[in-house]
Amino acid sequence: MEPKAETSHKLVFEKEGVYLHTNAKRSNQDTTIPGFIRIVERGGEPALEWSALEDEGRNTAAVFYTKKDGEGGVEDTNFDPGYEPDWAVISTVKRDRVREHPPVKETSQWSFSLPLSELYSLRRSRFSLGRNFLVFTSRGGHPLPPLHFHRGGTRELLRALQHYIILAPSPVDGRLFLAYPHDSGALSQSFDELHLFDDGSSDLVSVSLLFCRFIQDPYATTFGGFSKVTNFFRGALRPPDSPFHSRGPQDHHGPPSADDEPGFELITCLGPKPDVTRGQPLDKWEEFLDPEGRVKDPQQIKELVFRGGITPSLRKDVWKFLLGFYPWNSTVKEREDILRMKTDEYFRMKVQWKSVSEEQEMRNSLLRGYRSLIERDVSRTDRHNTFFSGNDNPGLALLNDVLMTYCMFNFDLGYVQGMSDLLAPLLFVTQNEVESFWCLTGFMEMHQNFEESQEAMKQQLLQLSLLMKALDPELLDYLDSQDSGSLCFCFRWLLIWFKREFSFEDILSLWEVLWTRLPCENFHLLMAASILESQRGEFIGSDHDFNTILKHINELTMKLDLQTVLRGAEANYLQLACCKELPVKVQEVIGLYVPPSPDDETSPESESHEMQ
């Protein structure tokens, strides 16, 4: 009897750059495995398959997930997933020895193939720093390892899946979608109706698990190895390619969502960039105070600071006003009372974590996680600065204590990697534990970049894309042609306000300029646009691809002139502000958009404008 011929297969969908993150605890295992995701029809049955890049050239899909229905599946006792998925209830894997699957050769333990008829659900989740990933679960209850789309493609994959199955949102969990076989009317269902990427529902991942993930991810991956962060964030931001993805008219004047294509008509009214000059630092303070100590003209102070910064000897006084520690209209006596009250409040919060015994902390994984992460970050924050250098430095102890106390102040957020970068300059200037803490709380109120959902970060990158489309559409088109149009390589700039791009002294000058919120609250985005424009000669006409663009951007660290960038950012603002046909979305970004009054909304002129 002749052997049975191998079943033919048809490749329906393929996407590279899909990484399997194992979070393996064993030191001899890779925790990030690049590979391919495919939809393949084998013998007429479609299957979802992932194979590692190193396995290409060999047959794929060594692991099969089967129904838990007693069909003879045998549990693989040697299988070690190496990660702790929050969605997993059953972590064992079974190989089907009854069903006839296409013959495969043994490859790495992570490759898998799942027939779509056995797909039970998919879950869209997000780690911190904007990392979106998909988790597929079989009808036997077995979750596959999470797949991270570092180069985008999740929407394309889900569209391809819709040709074979229906994805219905779970009534219990807004990020969980159940798979059903197609019926005759299923093809008419719109992809957008599934709301796969709506963020209205809350994730069920606990705060403790979130920080377990933070602790497992090394600091170098978060900031030092920035290319990985960029890739993680890139998949979440990439806009859909479908021409049918559009916003409803009711959202016309609202801020763009994370999945919107930030497009608008080409701007032709921009004039030449104006020449901008910087001023001298604010070097007098007492003359701006009335006899009782009130600041007579806060706006004038802000304008002087925006134009030239602050003399180092005055920073300790002026920063406390810029960051909201003292009200601008407070008297000297009132400020003494505020300092006394804030000091008492600070030490009450500090005592809360200081009084926790080791035995108590062993039962408090959140506090333990915060402490571990803070200790690790403090040990490598601005160690080149004499205030934080050396062993047993008092500055390091203050940095640690202020961050731990902030966890008591805002326990929902706690500590997130990067917050030590924000605190260090504050502590260096104030030289005071209490004052630096309250300045940090004020900074965090205007700096929403550390929220778990990362919506603020995605929104800022989209707004930066809008600015670049207005200021230099040719450069943005070039970056987009090199798969860099999402501008995710600017992620670190915006996350910690250029802390790694300029010297420590420059950061003191830059941040006090940004704290004035002049000429608009998004001046830091105009700065980012200024830096990108300064590099257009390097990019346009070159053979750069995504990786070399990312490498070049990272190598700009400590090579940028702050005053040149500030002049370019202000010139960008003035150039846009002078344009009389500036799109509403760009007006919103730079703070020029004024919503129409109720009377205007009902006038014929407003209706005509709305139609336009």
Image (tube, rainbow, N blue to C red):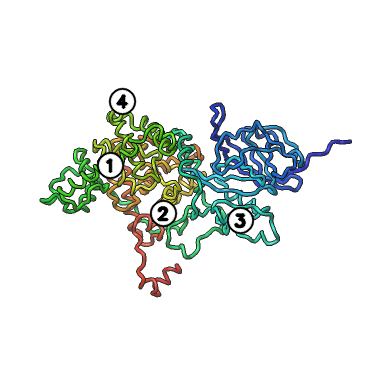
Q: Which of the image's four quarters has the C terminus?
A: bottom left
Residue located beneath label 4 in the image:
392
Q: Is residue 277 above or below residue 248?
A: above
- Mark-to-mark CA distance, 3 and 4: 57 Å
Secondary element at tag 1? helix
Of the image marks 2 and 4, the number of the one nearer the N terminus? 4
Residue 202 tag number: none
Dividing the image into 4 quarters, which one contains the N terminus?
A: top right
Q: Which mark is residue 346?
A: 1
**Would you name the residue on which mark 2 appears?**
470
Say what secondary structure mark 3 lies in: strand
Q: Determine whether label 1 and label 3 are within 8 Å by CB.
A: no
| Marks 1/4: CA–CA distance | 24 Å
Mark 1 vs mark 3: which is more N-terminal? 3
Q: Position of residue 34 (x, y in %)?
A: 58, 36
Q: Amino acid at mark 4?
A: Asp
Could you classify mark 3 by the number of other residues whose Cα lies within 10 Å: few (under 14), some (14-19), or many (20 or more)? some
* Spatial separation of the CA atoms under disc 2 and disc 4: 51 Å
Per the image, the residue denoted by label 3 is 168
For marks 1 and 4, give the one nearer the viewer. 1
Q: At label 1, which amino acid type do we have?
A: Tyr
- What distance separates the C-alpha of mark 3 from that of mark 2? 39 Å
Q: Nearer the viewer, residue 165 or 277?
A: 165
